[in-house]
């Protein structure tokens, strides 16, 4: 039986959704660790799970293996991320078909980043230049696949302005995308400003806020470096606690406050960039926070 698409889940939801993002292991041994980590997270019962593709140089085959593992472990629906990096239109068509044949009905359609050391994204010959082209390809080839796309509360680093970025976000939705998942942010005001601007630009799709737990200043700085998001000084100060356990607790407290604020103001769900870390999601304060609004629909 095919599991519901994210669009169907969002339309039918009576409470905000909870989704978790994983990344594929870098070597075959990592799959055992990932499986163990997922097993420990089972009580959280996310509404759906996503797994990245090609991010940080990870292998394409390992992404496929990770999607299959998530599906086998009963974490359905699975959202497969797919990027245009290094792939021709024909390669992408083959990958879309392979994802479909694996029973996955949700794709996060992304352009991807330029290779390390390069500042400009250049598609390969007969490749796709924008995520909107990938959405159009997916929808023309497999209309039953639900597409998510990326949105940037603090504006995509290459975009000349928020208005330009929103125009391109709207192009992705006009090409057939079903929902938006945001880049991580540490200040809820950025999400609400973005939401207002998106609605004013005619974007009606659900916009799922993406949040990342951070347990140290070093982790925060790594997250800011790859996302180009910003962080309030108050969070930096809290993470500067001399004791690593106190810093970890401060990071969880920040995340809990973000989640509570977003849910209280009507966010359609919470997407956690959990990065395979069972310890974080099982932290009692985070578990209590999730239990306040997420009674696990499955
Ligand atoms: C939720 C989420 C998940 C992600 N998962 C992954 C992953 O699994 N693997 C990975 O490698 N990366 C991932 N990324 C990172 C993403 O690939 C990068 O942020 C990338 O730089 C942009 O991808 P995009 O899909 O937003 O691109 P696009 O929507 O194509 O936008 C990229 C830039 O081009 C501009 N633009 C778009 N269309 C046009 C146009 N027609 N003309 C001119 N300019 C245009 C946009 O305004 C933006 O500045 C993820 C990001 C997010 C937010």
Image (spheres, helix red, strand yellow):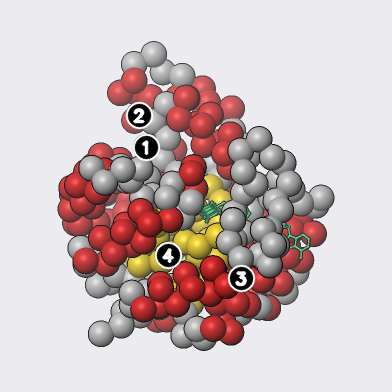
Between marks 1 and 4 in the image, the one whose residue lies nearer the viewer: 4
Q: Residue at x 34, y 16 (%)?
A: 243
Left or right: where 102 falls relative to 225 = left
Separation (CA) of disc 1 from disc 4: 27 Å
Q: Residue at x 41, y 18 (%)?
A: 241
Separation (CA) of disc 4 from disc 3: 18 Å
View quadrant of ligand 1: bottom right
* Numbered mark located on residue 252 in the image: 1
Establish whether ligand 1 lies closer than 8 Å to the Cβ of label 2: no
Residue at disc 2, secondary structure: helix
Residue at disc 3, secondary structure: helix
Residue picked out by circle 3: 89
Left or right: where 22 falls relative to 112 = left
Q: Residue at x 31, y 59 (%)?
A: 65
Between marks 4 and 3 in the image, the one whose residue lies nearer the viewer: 3
Can residue 36 be seen here? The reply is yes
């Amino acid at each position: 039986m095919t599991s519901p698409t994210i669009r169907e889940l969002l339309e039918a939801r009576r409470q905000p959704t909870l989704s978790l993002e994983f990344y594929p292991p870098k070597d075959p041994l990592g799959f055992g660790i990932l499986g163990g980590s997922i097993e420990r997270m089972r009580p959280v019962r996310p509404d759906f799970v996503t797994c990245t593709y090609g991010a940080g140089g990870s292998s394409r085959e390992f992404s496929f293996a990770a999607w299959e593992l998530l599906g086998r472990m009963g974490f359905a629906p699975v959202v497969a991320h797919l990027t245009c990096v290094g792939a021709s239109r024909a390669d992408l068509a083959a990958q879309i078909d392979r994802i479909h044949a694996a029973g996955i009905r949700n794709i996060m359609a992304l352009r991807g980043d330029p290779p390390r050391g390069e500042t400009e994204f250049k598609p390969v010959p007969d490749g796709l230049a924008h995520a909107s082209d990938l959405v159009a390809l997916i929808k023309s080839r497999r209309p039953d696949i639900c597409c998510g796309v990326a949105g940037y509360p603090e504006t995509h680093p290459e975009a000349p302005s928020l208005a330009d970025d929103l125009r391109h976000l709207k192009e992705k939705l006009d090409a057939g995308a079903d929902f938006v998942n945001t880049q991580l942010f540490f200040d809820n005001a950025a999400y609400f400003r973005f939401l207002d601007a998106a609605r004013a630009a005619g974007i009606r799709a659900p916009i799922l806020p993406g949040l990342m737990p951070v347990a140290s200043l070093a982790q925060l700085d790594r997250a800011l470096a790859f996302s180009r998001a910003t962080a309030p000084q108050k969070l930096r100060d809290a993470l500067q606690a001399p004791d690593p356990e106190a810093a970890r607790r401060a990071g969880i407290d920040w995340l809990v406050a973000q989640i509570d604020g977003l849910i209280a103001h009507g966010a359609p769900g919470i997407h956690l960039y959990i990065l395979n870390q069972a310890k974080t999601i099982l932290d009692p304060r985070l578990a209590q926070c999730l239990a306040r609004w997420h009674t696990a629909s499955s």
